[in-house]
Image (cartoon, rainbow, N blue to C red):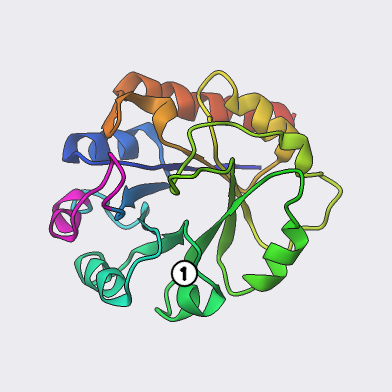
Amino acid sequence: MRTRIKICGLTREVDVVAAVAAGADAVGFVCYPQSPRYVTPARLRNLTRELGVFVTPVLLFVNAAPDLVEGALEMVPTGWLQFHGHEHEPACSRYQRPYIRAVPITDSTDFPHAEREFGSAAALLVDAPSAEFGGSGRSFNWSLLLLNTPRLRPLVLAGGLNAENVGAAIGEVRPHAVDVSSGVEQEPGVKSVSKMQHFVDAVRSADQRLTA
């Protein structure tokens, strides 16, 4: 078992390099102007220049106009997409790119319905609800994602994760991947090298425990 790791909300080249060195499988860039971690399309090319071929860039959007998404993909042709707004399946799949669809989890969330609705998604990302869209920075009740519920799509777990709780989260949810942003930051958009490394180490330790 190997849980994939996505570090999101990167705004500086030095943090991208550090995330890759720490062992991230994917790095996320927020293309939503209302976010404190927003990066302009013009910045994307420089931010993704040091990724190499084995780390996936993911571009996060919230109810974006198609020309904005297409412009970002011109800067990052290998990018995956991630949608956090009110986008329906046709709006997500129209770009012919792998995409991740965010699903806020509450007591009333019909997760199997979301899996069926977004059957074209490469993965579904589960997070706590947020009025501001994007990542919530808060955890939710992981038990709402029952292990004995069949999963049709790979599951990405987000929401309030950090080095201290990600091991427990992996043990309870068994996600395909975990997604962290504020949990490895000094301040919004500025990552901590030590926190990123500690987070990756905690994920790998959790994987070893489950394998054993």
x and y percentages locating residue 4 in the rendered image: 53, 45
User: Residue 137, relative to residue 91: is it above or below?
Assistant: above
The image quadrant that residue 204 belongs to is top right
Screen quadrant of the C terminus? top right
Give, as a three-letter code, the residue at label 1: Pro
Closer to the camera in the image, 136 or 54: 136
* Residue reaching furthest to the right: 148
Quick check: can you spot residue 208? no
x and y percentages locating residue 107 in the rendered image: 76, 43
Judge left or right: residue 58 versus residue 131. Answer: left
Quick check: can you spot residue 58? yes
User: Residue 187, relative to residue 56: is it above or below?
Assistant: above
Q: Residue at x 30, y 30 (%)?
A: 188
Q: Residue at x 16, y 58 (%)?
A: 45
Is 37 magenta? The answer is yes
x and y percentages locating residue 173 in the rendered image: 72, 39
x and y percentages locating residue 138 in the rendered image: 54, 31
Is 92 magenta? The answer is no
Screen quadrant of the N terminus? top right
Magenta range is 33-47
Q: Residue at x 32, y 72 (%)?
A: 65
